[in-house]
Amino acid sequence: MEKLTAYVISLKRSVDRRAEMQQRIDCLFKNKPKLSSILEFCFFDAVDAKSLEHLNFKQTRSNFLSKIFRGKRLSDGEKACYASHFTLWKHCIKTNKPCLILEDDVGFLDGFDRVIERLCALDYKPEYMRLMALRKFKIYSELKKFEDGDKWVLIREKASGTQGYYLTPKSAEKFILHSRVFIFPVDDYMDMFFVHRVESVLSLPYVLEDLGWVSEIGERKMKLSLAYKLSREIFKILLNIYRAIYILVFPKPDRIK
């Protein structure tokens, strides 16, 4: 069986963070030795905003739409973060293989090995699945429930975060198709299932944890002008209408047996 590759997004200059992430990976394989036969890890050099590497992406060069739609431009760090994920989406398409994409400040929780084993063994595989989110959900649609109580569920709400997710070439193509310009932070964009039509499947309980480190890729705080605040609020209303129409036209998928 060919191994599933987990790409860990990490700045090349973040030597200490990489070393600590490698320790967590080593500990994972030590505790779950069978996992090494189906999963491999690879560090991916994140696009570095401090080195202005995000300027190599034409999608980052215009701030106008971002100001209109969200009230402010993306910071250089947000552009670099988006560009990092964008590059891995393209790589997923190029290899034509599903993969995991992780950030370098996640920890592995109980059940991580079970999720990976199922993703490698089951005929049914989600097009895209989060291994955690920054929110907890009480309302969701159950797609599949396993004998040990684990669930794969569909969510149509904002989840936030890009700490860890399973990606297929099909979903990567959809994410890229609507990324001609980077308008929103990448996690906000990935939550917009009604735009790119990649439904959000979530593994419950979460099998990753956010260790809470401050991101070295970028900062989101930025002042808003009154005019752009107004345009943002108008766009929010339009976006909610678009979302409601999508949900009405595209009902939730049936439960997987």
Image (cartoon, rainbow, N blue to C red):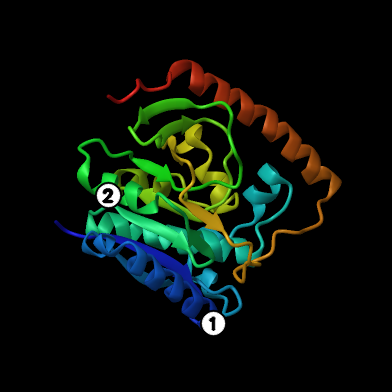
- Amino acid beneath label 1: Asp
Which quadrant holds residue 242?
A: top right
Of residue 220 and residue 2, the one placed in the foreground of this image is 2
Q: Which mark is residue 16?
A: 1
Across the whole image, how many numbered discs are drawn on residues? Answer: 2
Mark 2 highlights which residue?
A: 117
Left or right of residue 19, residue 63 in this image? right
- Amino acid beneath label 2: Glu
Of residue 94 and residue 144, the one placed in the foreground of this image is 144
Task: For the residues labelled 1 and 2, say whether their Cβ atoms are less than 8 Å apart.
Answer: no
Left or right of residue 170, residue 70 in this image? right
Q: Residue at x 59, y 69 (%)?
A: 217
Of residue 180 and residue 159, the one placed in the foreground of this image is 159
Query: How dense is the environment of label 1, judged by Cα within 10 Å: few (below 14), some, or many (20 and up)?
Result: few
Q: Nearer the viewer, mark 1 or mark 2?
A: 2
Disc 1 element:
helix
Q: Residue at x 22, y 40 (%)?
A: 122
Furthest toward the top, the residue is 248
Q: Residue 63: x and y, percent?
A: 64, 56
